[in-house]
Image (cartoon, rainbow, N blue to C red):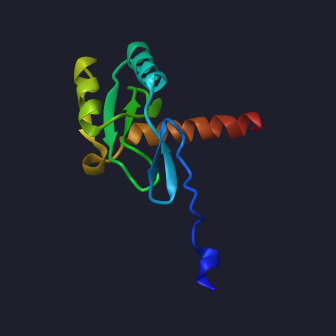
Amino acid sequence: MFDRFRRSGRTSRPARDAERTGSTRVRAADGEDVRHLEEFVRTRQGVEGFVEPRTAVSDVTLLLVAHDGEWTRRRVPSVRWAHEFANRHRVPSYDAAVVGVPQRMRDYNSRVKAERKARGY
């Protein structure tokens, strides 16, 4: 009876740039992610980095938040890499699991949501 539920002899291979994590697949960080983070740091003022640890559904991410609360988040290879990236770009970095995310980010999200609602989106 249980033979029906067993996997066949075939094994599925994860995508080339993805890693198997529990029951989900996580896309690994790539060069485009790094370029995006570098562009954000270069074009915004007062940027701080918040390193978010790996979870069951996502790999390590670096959350960058500008002075006005605008933010971006991208996958990164490791926690160490994220802090080194921040140091190279003279951006203060924090462990998000310890300090959380800044209030200005939540305020920014609220402003954007209100603007979209006012426009009828």
Q: Could you say which is closer to the camera, residue 72 or residue 23? A: 23
**Residue at 36% of width from left, 41% of height from top?**
102
Query: Could you say which is closer to the camera, residue 7 or residue 48?
Result: 7
* Percent position of residue 116, x then y: 68, 36
Residue drawn at x 49%, y 35% is: 17
Residue toward you, 70 or 49: 49
Rendered view: 81 above or below 24? above
Q: Find the residue positioned furthest to the top.
A: 42
Q: Position of residue 12 (x, y in %)?
A: 56, 52
Residue 34: x %, y % from top left: 41, 23
Q: How many marks?
A: 0
Q: Residue 77: percent from the left, percent from the top?
A: 34, 34
Q: Quadrant of the C terminus?
A: top right
Residue at position x 36%, y 42% in the image? 60
Quadrant assignment, res 48 = top left
Nearest the camera: 40 or 31?
31
* Left or right: 62 in relation to 98: right
Q: From what the image shows, is residue 9 above or below residue 60?
A: below
Give the side of residue 82 with respect to residue 116, left or right: left
In the picture as drawn, the residue positioned furthest to the bottom comes out as: 1
Extreme-right residue of the structure: 120
Name the residue rendered at 77%, 38% in the picture. 120
Question: Position of 92 compared to 29: left or right?
Answer: left
- Is 60 placed above or below 64 here? below
- Quarter of the figure with the N terminus: bottom right
